[in-house]
Image (cartoon, grey):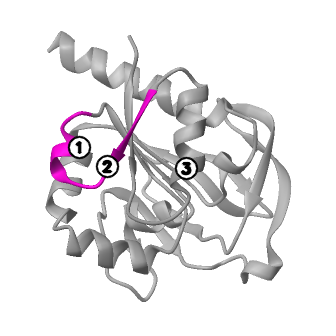
Amino acid sequence: MVMNIGVLALQGAVTEHVRAIQSCGANAILVKSSNDLAQVDGLLLPGGESTAMRRLIDYAQLLPALQEFSMEKPVFGTCAGLILLASEIENETPHIGKMRITARRNAFGRQVESFEVPLSIRGVKEDFSAVFIRAPKIVSVHEDVEVLATFEGDIVCARDRHFIACSFHPELTNDLSLMQYFLAMCREKAEEQVAQ
């Protein structure tokens, strides 16, 4: 089964996510409207600027459709996408708000303090090269949320039911293991829905 994976294409690292999805053998679909959402099995919320993304989501009147989509189908938030997905954000009102985590914006410093570090991501890879750029972090998680990776004691990747979020930018490396993990989640969810 070839999966159709959407990338929220309003702002941010859209092209890089499209390339990663296609490199995994799935179809990448640019999502700019609720009609686009109807075509996809899972959705990527890319890195970028979460405040700008939220303004564009509101302008496109997409928030209700994104919230409804995420009730049923897998969503992967990277960097700014983590902020959009979090059910709680320190000193800020949530956006899509469906993943049971609390996020802190820009927790790893400014753009000039960007860095790359090897991470062990549970169930994905022991030595994943993670690129952090003005990255948020996950301050706390609901008791049922699985922590997949930490860096210096901070949570930087987690899974909650059919949601996954990471602080870093997996699309900026040639390592497709985390994207393949998400595609497996999408395939599993699609098969479940067909079986029902």
The amino acid type found where label 3 is placed reads: Thr
Q: Which residue is mark 1?
A: 37
Q: Kindly state the secondary structure of the residue where label 3 is placed.
A: helix
Neighbour tally class for label 1: few under 14, some 14-19, many 20 plus, Cα within 10 Å: many
- The picture places residue 64, in percent across and down from the top left corner, at 14, 61
- In-front residue for pair 19/46: 19
**Mark 3: few, some, or many residues within 10 Å (few <14, many ≥20)?**
some
Residue at the spot x=16%, y=54% of the render?
65
Give coordinates of residue 118: x percent, y percent.
85, 48
Disc 3 to disc 1: CB gap under 8 Å: no
The answer to whether mark 2 and mark 1 are in CB contact below 8 A is: yes
Q: Answer above or below: position of 14 versus 93.
A: above
The Cα atoms of the two marked residues, 3 and 1, are separated by 18 Å
The residue where tag 2 is placed is 31
Magenta stretch bounds: 27-39
- Where does residue 147 sit, x and y in percent of width and height? 59, 48
Q: Horizontally, is 89 left or right of 98 in the view? A: right
Q: Which amino acid type is marked by label 2?
A: Val
Q: Residues within 10 Å of mark 2 (few under 14, many from 20)?
A: many
What's the CA distance linking mark 2 and mark 3?
12 Å
Work out whether 30 lies above or below 123: below
For the image, the number of numbered tags is 3
Query: In the rendered image, is residue 125 in sight?
Result: yes
Q: Earlier in the sequence, mark 2 or mark 3?
A: 3
